[in-house]
Image (tube, helix red, strand yellow):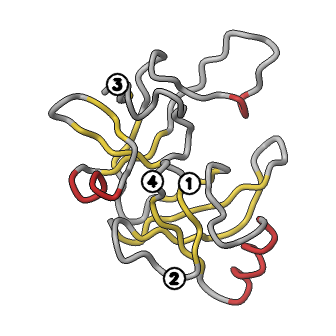
Amino acid sequence: CALDATAFASVPAENGMILCVDDATRTIKLPTSGNIAKYPLALNYSAEHLYESKLGLKDFKLGKDDFYPRVGYLAAGDLWTTNCVDLGAYSSAADVATALASGDVFAAVGTQGAPVIQAAAPSVGPVLQVIKKTTMPDGQDAFQLQVLKV
């Protein structure tokens, strides 16, 4: 499926985003509140394509006119590490780590595709749990997420 030209006109698709798959029109859409209820959700885990030597893997993204994204439907138990998150009400990754030390931390599907970290389990869409704060290979803050319920 191709990225929806309207939804991705100014927003790239990044690895770690959770996106909606519209099989009828063969397009990938952003997970707006209406789309989350209507379409299945999938994790973007596209293979990196870099053609300029100055770019690193941390700069990889797909635009609407690039390759089709590789996405996988979410299932309970899926586990992945990503730096593509919205910290939500937390001001830093360290604040999330502090919250993890004192209890469960969750994530909800954000309308821009990045999981939004929050203190309570979401009531709409899949329930994602933040397992731990970690780092990406280049040292950027990242989080390990797990799907508890689709």
Of 126 and 65, the residue lying toward us: 65
For the residues bearing labels 2 and 4, Cβ distance under 8 angstroms: no
Disc on the earlier residue, 2 or 3: 3
Residue holding disc 3? 2
Residue 112, x across and y down, in percent: 49, 48
What is the C-alpha distance between the residues marked 2 and 3? 33 Å
Please state which of the two labelled residues, at mark 3 or mark 1, is closer to the viewer: 3
Residue holding disc 1? 80
What is the C-alpha distance between the residues marked 1 and 4? 20 Å
Q: Could you tell me the amino acid type at mark 2?
A: Ala
Disc on the earlier residue, 3 or 1: 3
Residue 96, x across and y down, in percent: 72, 73
Q: Which mark is residue 55?
A: none
- At x 75%, y 60%, the residue is 134
What is the C-alpha distance between the residues marked 1 and 2? 20 Å
For the residues bearing labels 2 and 3, Cβ distance under 8 angstroms: no
- At x 62%, y 58%, the residue is 86
Q: Could you tell me the amino acid type at mark 1?
A: Trp
Tell me: 69 left or right of 139: left
Q: In the rendered view, would you say 117 is above or below 54? A: below
Question: In what element is the residue under mark 4?
Answer: loop
Q: Could you tell me the amino acid type at mark 3?
A: Ala
What is the C-alpha distance between the residues marked 3 and 1? 23 Å
Q: In the rendered view, would you say 137 is above or below 94? A: above
For the residues bearing labels 1 and 4, Cβ distance under 8 angstroms: no
What is the C-alpha distance between the residues marked 4 and 3? 18 Å
Residue holding disc 2? 120
Residue holding disc 4? 111
Residue 56, x across and y down, in percent: 77, 26
Question: In what element is the residue under mark 1?
Answer: strand
Q: Could you tell me the amino acid type at mark 4?
A: Thr
Of 62 and 74, the residue lying toward us: 62
